[in-house]
Amino acid sequence: MEEIYAKFVSQKISKTRWRPLPPGSLQTAETFATGSWDNEENYISLWSIGDFGNLDSDGGFEGDHQLLCDIRHHGDVMDLQFFDQERIVAASSTGCVTVFLHHPNNQTLSVNQQWTTAHYHTGPGSPSYSSAPCTGVVCNNPEIVTVGEDGRINLFRADHKEAVRTIDNADSSTLHAVTFLRTPEILTVNSIGQLKIWDFRQQGNEPSQILSLTGDRVPLHCVDRHPNQQHVVATGGQDGMLSIWDVRQGTMPVSLLKAHEAEMWEVHFHPSNPEHLFTCSEDGSLWHWDASTDVPEKSSLFHQGRSSTFLSHSISNQANVHQSVISSWLSTDPAKDRIEITSLLPSRSLSVNTLDVLGPCLVCGTDAEAIYVTRHLFS
Amino acid sequence: MEELDGEPTVTLIPGVNSKKNQMYFDWGPGEMLVCETSFNKKEKSEMVPSCPFIYIIRKDVDVYSQILRKLFNESHGIFLGLQRIDEELTGKSRKSQLVRVSKNYRSVIRACMEEMHQVAIAAKDPANGRQFSSQVSILSAMELIWNLCEILFIEVAPAGPLLLHLLDWVRLHVCEVDSLSADVLGSENPSKHDSFWNLVTILVLQGRLDEARQMLSKEADASPASAGICRIMGDLMRTMPILSPGNTQTLTELELKWQHWHEECERYLQDSTFATSPHLESLLKIMLGDEAALLEQKELLSNWYHFLVTRLLYSNPTVKPIDLHYYAQSSLDLFLGGESSPEPLDNILLAAFEFDIHQVIKECSIALSNWWFVAHLTDLLDHCKLLQSHNLYFGSNMREFLLLEYASGLFAHPSLWQLGVDYFDYCPELGRVSLELHIERIPLNTEQKALKVLRICEQRQMTEQAILLLTSHTGDVGLWTPRVRSICKILAMKAVRNNRLGSALSWSIRAKDAAFATLVSDRFLRDYCERGCFSDLDLIDNLGPAMMLSDRLTFLGKYREFHRMYGEKRFADAASLLLSLMTSRIAPRSFWMTLLTDALPLLEQKQVIFSAEQTYELMRCLEDLTSRRPVHGESDTEQLQDDDIETTKVEMLRLSLARNLARAIIREGSLEGS
């Protein structure tokens, strides 16, 4: 983590996402999208960290990221996902869900599709119509699932004008994030510390499973699923705790790890190297969690070790594990049960709202209006 | 009161006619509202078409510049770093840290200036371009002033090194020479270039004697006739004694050497060695510090502070800091020569040379269009312990006053308010009050934003809570300042309006607002009575200890528990819970009838559930309820119908209770008997 580039962009960044690479591609990531929040005018922007032989000769030095194009977005960008190579789905605080299309030929963005009243408190058509912020979106081509402060879950298809499926009052409190578990199943987290699994094959408005934190109902803000072991799920809470869940068993987290000092806004398993996990928080920190325990000398990776700490799982209810492949995130072997944590940002100030990892690249965005990029995560 | 430091500027608001109509205005924290009233100045009632708009007048316009936003955000980080510099650090290490901070600030200004410059060049609209260019010159002036303050106040360079710093300062800010040099050297025959002698002169004026010598050698190569005198001049330039940072020679040694060198130059002048070349002779005069010769180069010097530094370089290279102001004043007077009056920038620099920090800050506050500069500079100088003695006749000290102004400006901006929070934090006297006033005005359009504001509030009362705990054991009270409560309440109200009862309840639990929790619980119960089923079970079933927040909430939770027990066919537990809800008076009296009705199916079960004792209790509850029922005076048909249903219910209950009692007595009797 020698080189981490910061660029101030004059807007508070709420979301950053790498553009997925074409299947089978050997390239590294080079384009990412950002969304802004709390500005008078908010934007969806596309940035490139590639080389600029012809584009920009004087401004950018190597490693700096350059703006490719941007487009106005009505309301705060609450969530952002790439639908495919060209399309980006954005969730708005106005309850609107928009699909933007990128035209690489002339570097512009345009609105491709829009569901303006995806989330609302009082129905559209009623005189007292009031919208509700859409807080989370997840894509699995051709499906798009959105959740909102109205506790509603929508299932859209890219080519359908209307929602394919809507679960009204799916949650009594605010839904903060959503992710796919297995294809027809999704997982949501809410503001009273619950994790719910929904199966779109089932009719009715009841989740197929509810898991929850005990006691204090600490709101959960983010969720990510292990890329290979689909039963392993990580969530981040308002108190900055990282929880690891095994959705196949129990209704409580497998482990609770003390992490940040304030809200954990995002958690991501590394997509191709899931022994590594990344979290960011309102307290202005960005952490790299390394649970790969088989390598005794990781000095090349963590020789700086400024803020490395060892943690052991504090809670463990893993009495009856009998799967052949045990994820290191669920492991309870005391010898192996160690996670090394590295802080990636030099000094902390305002909230780090978002992060994304792809290959050796990491991008994050902050309320201090800076975007940080590194291309050598494991150098 | 101090007197005004100048006429206040008049801002005209387009479209508002203050001649015809009376104006109305109101102060906000960082801005002002202005509109026309419908009152007419004259008594006549003729309707003058008035301006239909309300104007917002902002005083800190620079806050709205997209490029300056980068300056605000980046310097925010530096500011925080500066506040965290260990107070224990003293002497050299502290000074070097402060100088580093100062340089960081300057590099942010420079980066901003460069970007602004690029934008100014690229601007298609000339008016726009002019606006950006003027911003560039403001930023450049800011950097110039800051750099000088850094040398004089933070670095506190002593005689000797002082001049070296000043030379660097001039070289950094009079930088046309680099493009000129590239131009001349790029030409085919540099020494015949029109600007060749200009370039050499500028190099000498800036004390860049090595470069000047190289240029002269080109002249010597080109014209053999003057090669000799060029060599002599070159030697003079080479031998000029200067203080080099690594050198250990004392100031006295340097002064002595310099005196010798100066006398040597003087001799060459008297010998008229360079009489054949007026260019070289004027260079020699410059190197002798001849004021008249220097003033001839006004064009090349471009400003008086350049003149000052060159003059010092060749006449008094070991000038002491305390003598600077004398030279500065006379250089300014000589340079302007009574032709023009000094500009604000000149006055600021002059004040700096006089080591009058307060004057510098005051002049800057008047001249510059934003508070960023003075706030950050003052804060830095305060960390250098240079401002302790000065107290204002209003508010707190100057540092805090300026930081408060700056932070208020940030709060007036729709998205920079988060930066302002940290500035308020470092204003010990009025920061907290200001923060409380400002943070109330942040609109909360999403829960996420509300959570961020909540976090700010909660983090800041931690210390207060600690103090409270030390003085008295107030427990939770300290944790929840009014603002946190009010944010949660706002969100809870919003949720109730949107019919999101679950959300409303969890917000009122977070606010520990018992009254509101009661209100929401009542809504839940009402909905239950209307619909016959509970909503938001995921929350109500998981209330946990939060249930104790209000009696009504406890009742709601317990009542739901009764339903769950009943659903699970744990009839005995359900029955005793139901009874205890009434006997413990947790259940509101208005709900008793519903509870008693809920008891009906339990009473009608095949096996006996309520014991005889419990049945007596139930009966007492029912009689209690019916006897206290108010007697209605009026009797419209609807009321009668309602009463009818009610009477039937009571009759049914009485019947059931009597039957149950009979069964219970028989059963208990037979059990005892057996």
Image: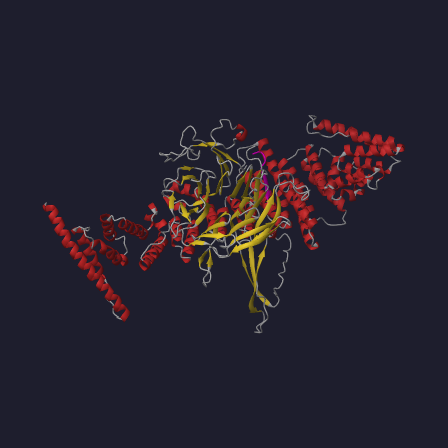
Q: Position of residue B479 (x, y in %)?
A: 40, 45
B512 shown above or below B93: below
Q: Is residue B55 left or right of residue B553?
A: right
Q: Nearer the viewer, residue A162 or B147?
A: A162
Q: Is residue B553 left or right of residue B241?
A: left
Colouring style: secondary structure
Q: Is residue B479 visible?
A: yes
**Furthest-left residue in this view:** B673
Magenta-colored span: A1-8
Location of residue B475 (image quadrant): top left
Magenta stretch holds residue B421: no
B143 shown above or below B274: below
Q: Nearer the viewer, residue B162 or B263?
A: B162
In the rendered image, the quadrant that contains the C terminus of chain B is top left
Q: Position of residue B331 (x, y in %)?
A: 74, 42
Q: Position of residue A237 (x, y in %)?
A: 43, 43
Q: Position of residue B459 (x, y in %)?
A: 46, 43
Q: Is residue A41 visible?
A: no
Q: Is residue B189 left or right of residue A32?
A: right
The tally of labels here is: 0
